[in-house]
Structures are given as structure tokens and as C-alpha cells.
Image (tube, rainbow, N blue to C red):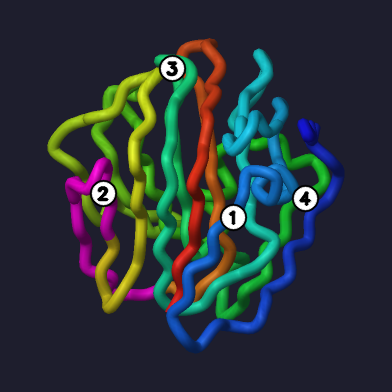
Amino acid sequence: MTRFYIVLAIALLAGSPPTSAESTHGIAATELAKWPFWGVGAVSTWGPQFAMREADNSKGVMIISPNSYRGDVVLRYRFMALTPATVGVAMLAVSDPGETDRLTLPDDYDGALGPWFNDKTNYFFAYKNAPHSVTPFVRQNPDAAEPLAVAEENVMIAGVYYDIEVGRRDGKLWLSVDGETLFEADDDAPLPGGHVALRLRGTAGFPAGCLIKDFSITTD
């Protein structure tokens, strides 16, 4: 069943109890389509695939998990960019500043990047990044002076499914694409935890779109 979500007013995402033992939870496309959606665009499902896309006047679109996660977290999923202009981002430990799992967004949030770099805590993994003329990287926000790690090259193009893995475990952050580790970083000042999010942004006036399937979250 296809479902579309356009930007709403205010989101208040409350933290859930932390998990204590490692577990992997597969999330179907229909479940992803129910996650809170932000930005100007839409989400839908197409068989086992979750689709997200921007409208022409978008500043970025994203979904944010209704639950939060403490400790180690690994996201695994298959991702296909539907336009060459698409930039793909995954975010871990997304929360308000301080020792909290809560995430609040104002009712007029329009999907822009600013809050994630300047106001909210998160690990920001840009994995499909060639349209910005920058290779994949991870930042610890807010107000990061520079990335924690940067890949040597871009390896993803539109129209192809890639296996994505982003994670934090035992003091390490990493990104792998199709089983190849593009970078690792030491997590010297670990964030306590928070929500996970998937974000898209187009480039030079061309909108972004993607398909995602086989999504799972592993927690310790």
C-alpha cells in the first residue's frame, strides 16, 4: 500500500529505553514509510522498496526513527539514487544537545541542513556525495571544525543498488559500501545516543530521489 507524507507542524520524538543486548531488527518498507518525515516532498512504498523524493522547492527531505538508541548502532540497507543529483546521508545519535535521547524540531522546520550542523548532536555520514564535489565523510555535530574521516574517492552512481553500512561500535565509526570500508574514525568523544535518520538533498536545482530496501538496525 502506497503512503505519502508531506511536512507536518511540530515533531517531538521521545527517547526510548536503551537496549542492553545486541539485537538486529529488520524494518520493512511499509514501516520506514511511517517514520516521521520532514521536508518538501514525499515518501511511498513500491513492493519491498521504500521511496523518498524531494519536490522542486525542497531544502532537503528526511525520515527520523520514532525510537532512539543508546550505545553501539549499525545501519545496513540497500540504496539506489534515482537522480544523478542525489546526495545521500545517514545520521546516528541524533538528539537535542546534552544527556538526552529526545529530539525536538520547530513547527516551521523545512528540511534545511542548518539544524543538524549547528544545533543538534549527531554523527553525519554523507555516503553518496559526488554531486557536491566532495568525497564521503563523517562529522560529529554540532559545530564540527572538520570531518572525523574522509574517503579517498566517490564510488556510487545513480541507478545502481549499493549495500550501505554505517556504524559505531567499540569506539569506532565507519562507512562501507558493497563490503568495502571507505573510512574508519576513532570516536574519542562519544555521543550518548539518539535517533537515526536518512536524508536526501539534490544539487544545483535538481531534486533528489532514492529507493531503499533490506533495512536493518543492529544495537548493542
CA gap, disc 3 to disc 4? 28 Å
Q: Give above or below for 206 relative to 54.
A: above
User: 188 or 197, which is in the foreground?
Assistant: 197
Residue 113 location in percent, x, y?
55, 39
Q: Earlier in the sequence, mark 3 or mark 4?
A: 3
Classify residue 196 by image quadrant: bottom right
Q: What residue would you read off at disc 2?
A: 176
**Looking at the image, is mark 4 or mark 1 nearer the viewer?**
1
Check residue 91 in the rendering and tell me which mark sits there, or answer none.
Answer: none
Magenta segment range? Answer: 174-190
Q: What residue would you read off at disc 1?
A: 27
Q: What residue would you read off at disc 3?
A: 85
Which structural element holds mark 3? loop
Q: Earlier in the sequence, mark 2 or mark 1?
A: 1
Q: Earlier in the sequence, mark 3 or mark 2?
A: 3
Residue 157 location in percent, x, y?
32, 21
| Amino acid marked by disc 1 | Ile
Q: Earlier in the sequence, mark 4 or mark 2?
A: 4
Q: Give above or below for 73 relative to 105.
A: below
Q: Earlier in the sequence, mark 1 or mark 3?
A: 1
Residue 44 location in percent, x, y?
70, 31
Where is the N terminus found, in terms of image quarters? Answer: top right
**Looking at the image, is mark 2 or mark 1 nearer the viewer?**
1
Which residue is found at the position 44% from the left and 47% from the top? 77
